[in-house]
Amino acid sequence: MKPKNILLVLSILISFNTFSQNESAKNPIIQPTIMVIPFVPKSESLREKLEKDNSILVAVTKVKEGFDKRGVNTIDLRAKLKQVTNTDVLEDEAITSDVDEVIKMSGADIYVEVQTKRNYSSSGNSISVTLTAYDAFSSQSLANKVENSPSFYTDNFDKLTEKAVENIIDDFLNTIQLKFTEILNSGRSVVLTLGVSPESKVNFTQELDINGSVLSDLIEDWVDKNSFKNYYHLQGITKTKMIFDDIRIPIKLNEEAYKVSTFVKSLRTYFQTLGLKFDRNVQGNNIVITFK
Amino acid sequence: MSYFLVVWACNIPQKTIPYVRSGEVEFMSMQHLGLATYRSKSIASGSGQAFNYAERSLFDNLFFKGIIGSPQATPLIEKENEFFKEHSDFYDFFLKNDFYHRFITNYKVISQNENQGSFYLTEEVTVDLNALRKYLEDNNITRKFGF
């Protein structure tokens, strides 16, 4: 290779390296926390499912491996179950098997439910694997994939499970990533319900400033200015209740993660300027404000 | 006279078949550790160019369209127009300067034939998708998993 060409290739490589360093500093990635769990009917326990059904254990492990390959750490379900049983909050085994409780305690942003079904036939055995990813925050489904392994004259369902998961895991993760892009571009949805306590003198039709603006108008103006790309939907207003069933908030603001609590904090600051006191309750993407 | 005819014929410029991206890329199989095998077709002016076109078409499909039924059924690069606005240098470096070869772990010719100056090729290529994806992420061409 001529010296001129070597210099050209080197300079291109150096510029890519500098470019990628600058770009990664400008656009940090916010990685969600993920937990992979088996699908269990209400009557079964998560721990039992993991310990007694080896195909499920293989499927859960292969899915976690898929995330590992993408550089994503996952919360270990068995470690979380142990942690949950050690807390003072829980009183009996039944609670540790409740999927919702485990997901809440895990702090996972996303959970992936894995289901397997063995198929027996005279022409060979196979296994169906179903993967579903949910946003723990809103319970919205992010991705779904089903795969049937080929049929073989074998009882080695673990191997069949491995093959089935390997066939779909990359496409499954790619679909989740596309959903992330959609959420990045259109915002995360929260529900805001505002009400008044029985003892409160506040109502949404009261005038609050010298211009005659009523409380509901002021709140709607604030939501309009503070929602992502001004996107919100007001479901309805009465004298004592106001419901926004869809307000979009950004995932990032100034390259930092923007949480629901950040949104609520801004709202609190605004209500303080209006001299309003309230109680707040935040569960996932549901915000409930009750004026005192 | 015949001498001059031969000289004249030798100096007629051969037709150059430009590269045209086609969707004629088919997923064949997936192996362990993220190695995926595809079959890609091309038409070119010569043998060397046909290999280059077939492989370039494969990577173009992986980047901008996705390949149905494969582990990369969705495009690696979500917005093609924005990509070319911001990273056209990268594209030239990666595809036109054959940098993509480092992600090909195996290849074989399925069929090749020549007809009236056009070279037709079907090539089977195995790509290390995990390494390719990581390379694009490390160079901020694509986003790492997450927001």
Image (cartoon, helix red, strand yellow):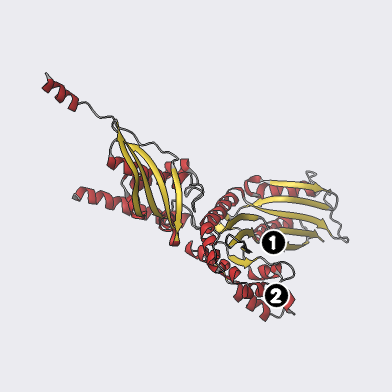
Residue A8, percent from left and from top: 26, 48
The amino acid sitting under disc 2 is: Thr
Residue B4, position as x, y percentages in the image: 12, 21
**Mark 1 Cα-neighbour bin, 10 Å: few <14, some 14–19, many ≥20:** some
**Residue that badge 2 annotates:** A96
As measured in the structure, the alpha-carbon distance from the residue carrying label 2 to the one carrying label 1 is: 20 Å
Whether residue A287 can be seen here:
yes
- Tell me: residue B73, above or below residue A29: above
Q: Quadrant of the C terminus of chain A?
A: bottom right
| Residue B108 place in picture, x, y as percent | 34, 50
Residue placed most toward the observer, A63 or A77: A63
Circle 2/circle 1 CB separation < 8 Å? no
Residue B112 is drawn in which quadrant? top left
Amino acid residing under circle 1: Gly
The dot on residue A284 is 1
| Position of residue A178 in the picture relative to residue B33 (left or right) | right
In this orientation, which residue lies closer to the viewer: B116 or A153?
A153
What chain is tagged by disc 2? A
Q: Nearer the viewer, residue B88 or B96?
A: B96
Which SS class for mark 2?
A: helix
Q: Is residue A72 left or right of residue A16?
A: right
Left or right: where does residue A193 sit relative to residue A56? right
Does residue B14 lie above or below B142 as drawn? above
Q: What chain letter is assigned to the residue under label 1?
A: A
Q: Quadrant of residue A146?
A: bottom right
Q: Of the numbered discs in the image, which one, if any, rests on residue B144? A: none
Q: Residue at x 62, y 66 (%)?
A: A108
Residue at position x 41%, y 47% from top?
B39
Image depth: mark 2 or mark 1 in front: 2
